[in-house]
Amino acid sequence: MAYSLIESLWLLGHIGFNEMLSENRKQKMEDIRPGPMEALVYYRSIPRYLLAKGLNRLWPRHFFAGVAPLRLQQVELAPPGPDWLVLKSRLCGICGSDLQLLKGVESLLLEPYASFPAVLGHEVVAEVVQAPEESEWRPGDRVAVEPLLPCEVRGIEPCHFCAQGQYNLCENFTQGRLSPGTILGLHKEAGGGMARFLAAHPSRLLRLPDNLNDETAVLTDSLASALQPVLDHFPEDQDTVVVYGAGIIGQHLVRLCKALGSKARVIVVARYPFQENLARAGGADLVLLSPDRAGLARAVGARLLPTTLGGGNLEGGANLFFDCVGSRSSMQEGLLALRGGGAYVLVGTTAELGPIDLSSLWFRELRLSGSAMYAYGTWQRQRVRTYQLAVDLLARGDYPVQGLVSQVFPLSDYRKAFQVAFDKRRHQSVKVVFDLREPFATTGVQNRT
């Protein structure tokens, strides 16, 4: 194809202009490379961990900031690989797993699945500030960060579970080019959401629609954590479902049963009146405040069978029991409250439970399972990414989120934030969030005190 002199000059100029734009964009990327920044860092200290554990047994609602191996300090972020993006944190929620770590009640057997020191925070709403040239992402894109670190992120061939889309069960969380760790926030290289910047693999990013504000989007991770067990154990319309525990995960479980169209009867066991009110607002058919065994039996339509010792047995009961507490008593009541063939699902992360009577497990042929994080599930006969479905539900506009984000703090107030999260009774806390936007910008959330 022949070009005229004018066309040739225009073409050369156009190419040069594009190259100039590319160089300018590259220069801007280099200009915003994160330098030293304040971050909330959890570091390895066996003495402090054990002391926090002992104090928590005596005062479980108090955060001992001077004891916990946690400090606000200057760090630098170095993305683990050239294909990783640099993100700027906007909001980051405090997860129950963060609280368990600070209380010293995490499972000792899970130690190999983390690396320290680590910037805490995996419930992240962020925006892209730096991306590879060929990336689909651009600076300013607002994202939710799915924090898992499975095979794909580690640069290795997919394991058995990752190949099937069950990357929450990845067998290589301790392998590959990254240090050990299941998620961002418990990993020493990628950073976490409780800092101005963090790094993320492009496969872990989900674009947030414009109609989904930050204060709602920060619920994505907790919603996905509840959504996965619901997709895996979706209740039939005629079922009776017990949600034991009315913290953030229990609140989501109630709302999901309704939002996804189940007509099952949903009973919630709550500890505090404010949790009862939130559960009713979320669609619970019945809410019980710390019931005894007889009260639970009446609620699930079971017969209480007296025993000389042990507090009595139940005959009949619920079809599905979501345990969001993970305690000795919650598991015991769950096994008793289920009818024959019922399903007990441990959603709350826990380690040691103490002695439990397991006779109902074999006597009534119950199904016992756990739920770990999120990956893919089946919804309306289609395979769906759980995190994406969580974003879609929040963006839909009819998912009841009022009151779920209960308090918001700047990162500098981390001591107060964790104290509020520790003491739900006093502060009526549900989801406590850090706002890392500049300036501190959260609107629409009135902190409960």
Image (cartoon, grey):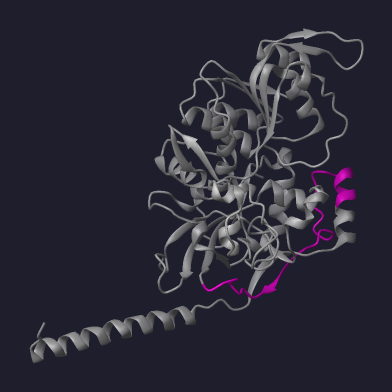
Q: Give the residue displayed 90% in from the left and 49% down from the top.
A: 54
Residue 105 seen in the figure: yes
Provide residue 12's location: percent of width, then percent of height: 21, 88
Provide residue 197's location: percent of width, then percent of height: 57, 68
Q: Give the residue displayed 64% in from the left and 75% down from the top.
A: 76
Which quadrant of the structure image shows residue 111? Answer: bottom right
Question: Is-magenta flag for residue 278?
Answer: no
Quadrant that contains the N terminus: bottom left
Left or right of 204? Residue 428 is right
Question: Is-magenta flag for residue 75?
Answer: yes
Provide residue 115's location: percent of width, then percent of height: 73, 63
Magenta stretch secondary structure, dominant: loop
- 391 w.r.t. 173: above or below: above
- 66 w.r.t. 420: above or below: below
Q: Give the residue displayed 59% in from the left and 62% down from the top.
A: 156
- 110 or 331, which lies in front? 110
Q: Which residues are magenta?
A: 53-82
User: Number of numbered discs present?
Assistant: 0
- 438 w.r.t. 434: above or below: below
Left or right of 87? Residue 178 is right
Left or right of 435? Residue 361 is right
Provide residue 270's location: percent of width, then percent of height: 68, 28
